[in-house]
Every structure is written in C-alpha cells, then in structure tokens.
Image: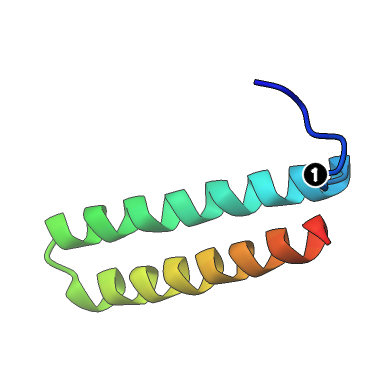
C-alpha cells in the first residue's frame, strides 16, 4: 500500500486520545452484553446509549482532527 502525501494524518496526541476513546466504547458495548446476561435491562440500555453517543463523538473527533 502506497502512502499518499496529500492524505491528512492525525497527530500523536489525537491518535492516543482516539485509541482510549475506542477502548471506552468497546468496554461499554461489553457491559451491554454483561448486563443483558444478568437481566439488568435498564443498565444495558444505559450502556448502549453511552456507547452510541461516544462512538458518534469519536467519528466527529476523528473527522475534525483529519482536517
């Protein structure tokens, strides 16, 4: 795969914060599964909403950092 010099890249700090945000989102989705298996549907819904909001924030953050 060739590197395109015109393609924008993310700075190191942005990559690190995006990485941690991704870990938090994955942990929230894992908690959804755990809460569903424990039959705690309210917490499962809460973690699902948090995960979806954080994933949306991550996409907008990545778009902003690539500009």
Number of callouts: 1
Which corner quadrant of the image does residue 60 belong to? Answer: bottom right
Q: Looking at the image, which residue is at 76% across and 44% down? A: 15
Picture coordinates of residue 66, whole percent (x, y) = 79, 56
* Left or right relative to 65: residue 29: left
Residue sitting farthest toward the top:
1
Which corner quadrant of the image does residue 56 belong to? Answer: bottom right
* Left or right relative to 29: residue 63: right
Q: Looking at the image, which residue is at 77% across and 27% down? A: 3
Determine whether 46 is above or below 67 in the image. below
Q: Which SS class for mark 1? A: loop
Determine whether 47 is above or below 34 in the image. below
Q: Looking at the image, which residue is at 87% across and 35% down? A: 5
Q: Looking at the image, which residue is at 61% across and 70% down? A: 57
Picture coordinates of residue 7, whole percent (x, y) = 80, 44
Picture coordinates of residue 8, whole percent (x, y) = 82, 48
Please give the residue where the numbered disc 1 appears in the rendered image: 7
* Left or right relative to 27: residue 20: right
Quadrant housing the C terminus? bottom right
* Left or right relative to 58: residue 13: right
Label 1 crowding class (10 Å Cα cut-off): few <14, some 14-19, many 20+? few
Nearest to the observer: residue 37 or residue 52: 52
Quadrant housing the N terminus? top right
Picture coordinates of residue 18, whole percent (x, y) = 69, 50
Determine whether 53 is above or below 8 in the image. below
Specify how the rendered protein is coloured.
Answer: rainbow
Nearest to the observer: residue 51 or residue 6: 6
């Amino acid at each position: 795969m060739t590197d395109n010099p015109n393609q924008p890249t993310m700075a190191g700090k942005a990559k690190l914060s995006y990485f941690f945000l991704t870990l938090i989102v994955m942990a929230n989705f894992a908690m959804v599964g755990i809460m569903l298996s424990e039959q705690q549907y309210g917490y499962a819904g809460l973690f699902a909403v948090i995960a979806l909001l954080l994933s949306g924030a991550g996409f907008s953050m990545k778009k902003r950092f690539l500009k």
